[in-house]
């Protein structure tokens, strides 16, 4: 049974400021609250508006249907920063990647209190753990993947990506199969990288369509990525997007599913069993990973707003959809059953974009 117990005995912390990386972000400390969370639940990273420093973190209890917003600020007395990109949990610690603040925060996932941070990162996107003492952090506007020691919160090295400049650099989501890590290169890129985690080096790359946005691994050892096709007038090209099924071991495209020019697919997700694929393309779509053609109808229809994020509950297969609304007001999360029946909805922060299950 989940419990989210909030103690309102607020402690007045010292009001201070400290210069953040690059001197452009200040952490302002204020009143804090005490939290204690048990059981399973869902973290939602709310990006906030670029350069406004209004990123937030929300937490949702699926059993009680209770949501707590701005938990990082309330638990630590300071703002999360500028553009909360993603979050990953390992060994009871949540790692929040804050893109335009150039920082990765480590928090206790029961109390939401900060326990450490990794700083001086160019423009971090995602973090993936190779072991307790080694993790990779992908970057935007950098041709390197950073290697870090999470125990010491230190950068220990870099993986340089061949044929990628700092200006056009983009590495994104990561999935691992055995000793090899696979990374999609999104912004102005068209590649999937294969990295040997024993040598921390790129050993192969696979060209797909323009701008692969996300990456997932199914139960048969197949990689899935979806491209957005770029945009009309882009110097890097514009084409119809596509969904790709890739044999990870042979590292070659096994099947390509074509969308129409002008479609905007994104957010490829896999359920816990690894046998069903989900993605956003205005509506929410679902497909068996062994299918040979795209589905004829969505599992969840569009509300005419902006579906921006997607996740599937590892416990019961419920589908959670993040709605950015208009990119300026509080976003919404819609919770559906696996068959598309609406079960709940709740407000979160501005531009909810990523989910993390605990």
Image (cartoon, grey):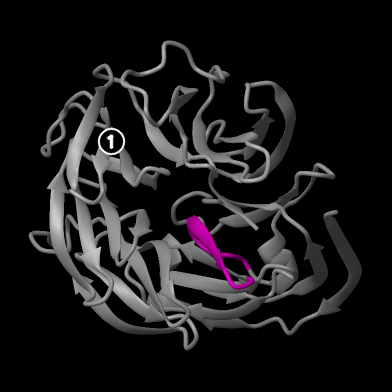
Q: Work out whether residue 213 or residue 85 is closer to the camera in this orientation and state it.
A: 213
Image position of 237 (left or right of 293): left
For this rendering, which residue is in front, 212 or 12? 212
x and y percentages locating residue 324 in the rendered image: 54, 36
**Left-right relation of 283 to 75:** left
Residue 113, relative to residue 38: is it above or below? below
Residue extending furthest top?
A: 296
Q: Give the range drawn in magenta.
A: 79-92
Residue at point 19%, 38% (across, down)? 253
Q: From this viewpoint, is residue 129 visible?
A: yes
The spot of residue 203 in percent (x, y) is: 14, 64
Instruction: Say whether residue 212 is left or right of residue 4.
Output: left
Q: Which residue lies furthest to the left in this view?
A: 163
Residue 121 lies in quadrant: bottom left
Provide residue 299's location: percent of width, then percent of height.
54, 19
Secondary structure type for disc 1: strand
The magenta stretch spans residue 169:
no
* 91 within the magenta span: yes
Residue situated in front as seen by the camera: 162 or 245: 245
The C terminus: image quadrant? bottom right
Q: Nearer the viewer, residue 220 or 109?
A: 220
What residue is shown at x 18% (from left), y 48% (from top)? 250
The residue beneath circle 1 is 245
Q: Quadrant of residue 193?
A: bottom left
Dot 1 crowding, Cα within 10 Å, few <14, some 14–19, many 20+ = many
Residue 185 against residue 92 in the figure, above or below: above
């Amino acid at each position: 049974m989940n419990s989210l117990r909030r103690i309102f005995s607020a402690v007045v912390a010292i009001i201070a400021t400290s210069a953040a990386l690059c001197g452009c972000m200040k952490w302002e400390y204020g009143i804090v609250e005490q939290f204690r969370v048990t059981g399973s639940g869902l973290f939602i990273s709310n990006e906030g508006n670029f350069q406004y420093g209004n990123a937030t973190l929300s937490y949702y209890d699926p059993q009680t249907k209770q949501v707590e917003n701005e938990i990082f600020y309330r638990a630590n007395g300071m703002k999360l920063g500028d553009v909360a990109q993603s979050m990953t949990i390992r060994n009871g610690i949540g790692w929040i990647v804050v893109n335009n603040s150039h920082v990765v925060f480590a928090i206790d996932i029961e109390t939401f209190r900060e326990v450490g941070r990794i700083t001086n990162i160019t423009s971090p996107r995602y973090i993936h753990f190779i072991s307790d003492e080694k993790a990779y952090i992908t970057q935007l506007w950098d041709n390197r993947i950073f290697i870090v020691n999470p125990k010491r919160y230190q950068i220990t090295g870099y993986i340089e990506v061949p044929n990628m400049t700092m200006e056009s650099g983009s590495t994104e989501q990561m999935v691992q199969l055995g000793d090899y890590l696979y990374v999609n290169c999104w912004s102005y890129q068209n590649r999937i990288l294969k990295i040997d985690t024993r040598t921390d080096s790129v050993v192969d790359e696979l060209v797909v369509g323009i701008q692969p946005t996300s990456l997932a691994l199914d139960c048969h050892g197949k990689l899935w990525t979806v491209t957005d096709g770029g945009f009309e007038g882009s110097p890097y090209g514009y084409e119809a997007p596509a969904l790709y099924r890739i044999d990870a071991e042979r590292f070659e495209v096994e099947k390509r599913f074509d969308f129409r020019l002008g479609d905007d697919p994104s957010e490829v997700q896999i359920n816990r069993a690894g046998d069903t694929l989900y993605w956003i393309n205005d509506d929410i779509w679902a497909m068996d990973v062994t299918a040979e053609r795209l589905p004829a109808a969505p599992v969840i229809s569009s509300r005419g707003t902006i579906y921006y994020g997607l996740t599937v509950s590892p416990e019961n297969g419920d589908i959670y959809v993040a709605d950015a609304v208009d990119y300026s007001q509080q976003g919404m999360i819609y919770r559906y059953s696996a068959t598309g029946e609406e079960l709940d909805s709740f407000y979160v922060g501005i531009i909810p974009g990523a989910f993390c299950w605990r």
